[in-house]
Image (cartoon, rainbow, N blue to C red):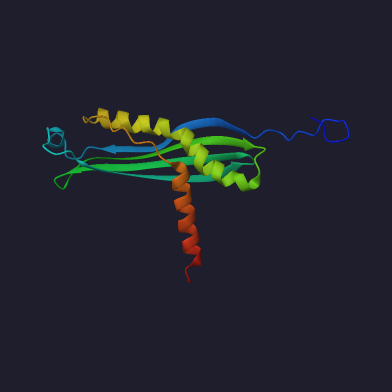
Amino acid sequence: MTNGNGTPPETAPSPQLNVLAQYTKDFSFENPNSPASLAPQQQPPSINVQINVGASNVAENDYEVVLKVEGKAEHAGKLMFSFELAYAGVFRIVNVPQENLHPLVMIECPRLLFPFAREIVATAVRDGGFPPLMLDPIDFVSLYRQNMERQAAAQQQPS
């Protein structure tokens, strides 16, 4: 392909996303009512899990993305177990247009981190004496849109 004068067009550098590091930033698992909480139950526990994503620029093209996963299981009003995980990664992102950078950091980066966070939670719950908690896949696009809508609504409210 040529640019009309017989010479090949200038090619733009291709976008790159590199994982520089992944790590557990903070983790807590509590089983406060054991061994009673480990006894067989007639009904399954009520399980509540919340996911949040945060990011910060740590160098010119490097971003730390933190996936926060918090959850608890309760049965008959008693806490069976709870956990809090902050699983992070440092990502180098180059040759990405500015308008695409925020969605890339807040959607694709946590999507890459999630399987590792899921495994940490499943293993901790299993090691706490319960069946492994297999977190359902997360739609980070929907989570991103919800957060953007929430921020837009908060900015429109009078102070």
Left or right, 73 with reference to 54? left
Q: Is residue 127 left or right of residue 55?
A: left
Where does the N terminus fall, quadrant-wise?
top right
Image point 44% across, 47% down: which residue?
Answer: 143
In this rendered view, identify the residue nearer to me: 87 or 115. 115
Residue 62: image quadrant is: top right
Residue 123: percent from left, percent from top: 31, 28
At 46% across and 52% down in the image, what residue appears? Answer: 147
- Give the residue furthest to the right: 5
> Is 145 located above or below residue 136 in the figure?
below
Whole-percent x and y of residue 24? Answer: 42, 34
Residue at the location (80% across, 33% down)?
9
Q: Position of residue 96 (x, y in %)?
A: 65, 40
**Residue 52 locus on image (x, y percent):** 41, 46
Q: Nearer the viewer, residue 3 or 101?
A: 3
Residue 34 found in image quarter: top left
